[in-house]
Image (cartoon, grey):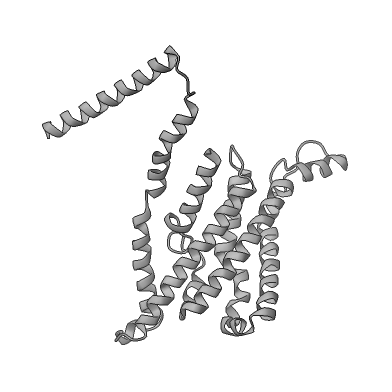
Amino acid sequence: MEYTISLILIAISAALINNFVLHYFVGICPFLGVSRKVDMAFGMGCAVTFVISVAAMLSWTLTYFILRPGAPLATWVYQSLGGAGESDLSILNYIVYIFVIASSVQFVEMYVRKFFPALYKSFGVFLPLITTNCAILFACLEIMKNVSGAAEPWDMGKSVTLAAFGGVGFTIAIVIMAGIREELDLCDVPKPLRGAGITLIVSGILALAFMGFTGVDAGLSQALAPAKAAEVLPVTRGPLAAKALAKISTVDAITQATKKIETIER
């Protein structure tokens, strides 16, 4: 149950609260360049989501087994060759992640060109530019941080959840932006603000709007806390359980009375 709750919190945080585009401001190039039409923006969002998910799986596997300090496979090879201690190939993280992202993008480009030629032509140069989309590299680096430097390293499930819902958040942001820009084409925008100017202003307003999701993860964790406490407390009918429940109810009553007194004094 705790693992499922952590996956839900990671997903909501990556898609809405800490949106890659509107919170961390990564992936701005395709966000501004491919957000002129909703259908094209949705296709780009799906492509980025697929690439970022594949890159996350590959980067977690390589980081956990080869690149991180004390990685089992790299350490075994190092000790088999006569080395002492643990291996540390973390200096190769950036290079490996770039190769992983480039190969994933190449696979997506071949697939889209084969089965969706019209969509491939509409993407133009922006499809190969997914290789340089810093949102994908950012997701890989976040996975590295939570695998290498964390007390409890993330597993494959948490890493893929972060990447996939980060891609979903990117899709949400770029589709909303495309819908607004389609409406702006019908508006009388002042000449100095046409083009990139009004687009950046709208992006800032969207970022402010997404700030309204701040604290949702904390509220969800608090809402799920009673359920977790109920799971921890054994379901018994003995005297010890009765005393524990009586203490909990007494503390709750004192807390509520204190809040009422503070409200009356104010």
Q: Say whether residue 200 is left or right of residue 43.
A: left
Q: Say whether residue 214 is left or right of residue 235.
A: left
Residue 153, given in percent of the width and then of the height, sits at 61, 41
The quadrant holding residue 147 is top right
On-image quarter of the C terminus: top left
Against 213, is 255 above or below? above
**In the current view of this chain or complex, which residue is farthest to the right?**
81
The quadrant holding residue 199 is bottom left
Q: Say whether residue 27 is left or right of residue 86.
A: left
Residue 54, given in percent of the width and then of the height, sits at 65, 61
The residue sitting at 78% across, 45% down in the picture is 73
Residue 144, given in percent of the width and then of the height, sits at 62, 50
**In the current view of this chain or complex, which residue is farthest to the left?**
265
The residue sitting at 46% across, 53% down in the picture is 12
The quadrant holding residue 106 is bottom right
Given residues 196 and 162, the one toward you in this image is 162
Against 66, is 210 above or below? below
**In the current view of this chain or complex, which residue is farthest to the top?**
239
The residue sitting at 40% across, 18% down in the picture is 244
The residue sitting at 61% across, 65% down in the picture is 50
Q: Say whether residue 94 is left or right of residue 73.
A: left
In this figure, what is the number of numbered marks? 0
Given residues 242 and 108, the one toward you in this image is 242
